[in-house]
Image (cartoon, rainbow, N blue to C red):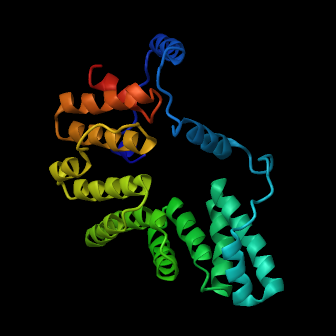
Amino acid sequence: MEVKARRGPRPPRDPHEAERHERERIESRSTDAWIDEGSVRDAAQAATDRAGAPPERAPRRAPQPLDADVAAELVDAVGRERGQRLAERLAQASEALDRERFDEAKRIASSIAKEAPGVSAAHEVVGLAAYRLGQYRPAVKALETARDLHTDPALLPVLADCYRALGRYAAVERVWLEIREISPAHEVLSEGKIVAAGALADKDDLRGAVELLTPKGPPKRVRDHHLREWYVLGDLYDRLGDPIAARRWFEQVAANDREFADVGDRLRSLGR
């Protein structure tokens, strides 16, 4: 989304060319030797379907039960009967967040956070919903509160990206250092690295951003977070005016997932 906003809308393509690319894409599926188990394709399509469905017709499913430890925290905070009710409500808020009903998720979770301020999970849902709504100051407040109550490494890249959106680059660097010290899962480390590189690029340090993201060697198995890093590297090199390096990274992305973001358009714009 950030890249699209910077690049602006693309001119319409020849429909015959689009049909040809679609035929090639379908044919290639039968010959690709590698399948990305963590592709964003299904997730992106599901998000598109949810966003396009009329609210009154959108299918609802029963909220997944809340984590037992979180439910116990709510019971300890407000008593058994009320705690059980808030646990159901927090499960509804989490479901709304998952279905991209961010206003609903924020509204429900905010009321729970006021009633049970010591339960970090409620603040997490508030922070994540506010982040997805582009409300970065409330997101920072909620995520900082959640971190003070219970550190969840997976939330740190989100917090760092909120700081980045607010231009608080020193805070981005502090959170990035915290992520590195924790040494979390590869996906979390990768997201933190991408945010930190984005902050450097915001400050016109494109070379520093490239240096931060450039891998030391090829991965044993390509995961979705590798594709995201390579895509950002391609974009950074494109911004640096180095089309050869940009093509190299975009080609690595396309070799593993031809439908990743707008990688096909990016390669065509670079003459491939």
In front of the other: 139 or 64:
64
Q: Quadrant of residue 94?
A: bottom right
- Residue 161 rendering spot, x and y as whole percentages: 39, 62
Residue placed at 45% from the left, 68% from the top?
Answer: 136
Q: Quadrant of the C terminus?
A: top left
- Residue 151 rendering spot, x and y as whole percentages: 47, 74
In front of the other: 17 or 82:
82
In front of the other: 132 or 222:
222
- Residue 210 rendering spot, x and y as whole percentages: 21, 47
Q: Is residue 247 above or below residue 107?
A: above
Q: Quadrant of residue 174?
A: bottom left
- Residue 219 rendering spot, x and y as whole percentages: 34, 39
Residue placed at 48% from the left, 13% from the top?
Answer: 24
Q: Is residue 35 above or below residue 220?
A: above
Residue 96 seen in this snapshot? yes
From the viewer's perspective, is 226 left or right of 249? right
Residue placed furthest toward the front: 220
Q: How many marks?
A: 0
Residue 7 seen in this snapshot? no
Residue placed at 45% from the left, 29% from the top?
Answer: 257
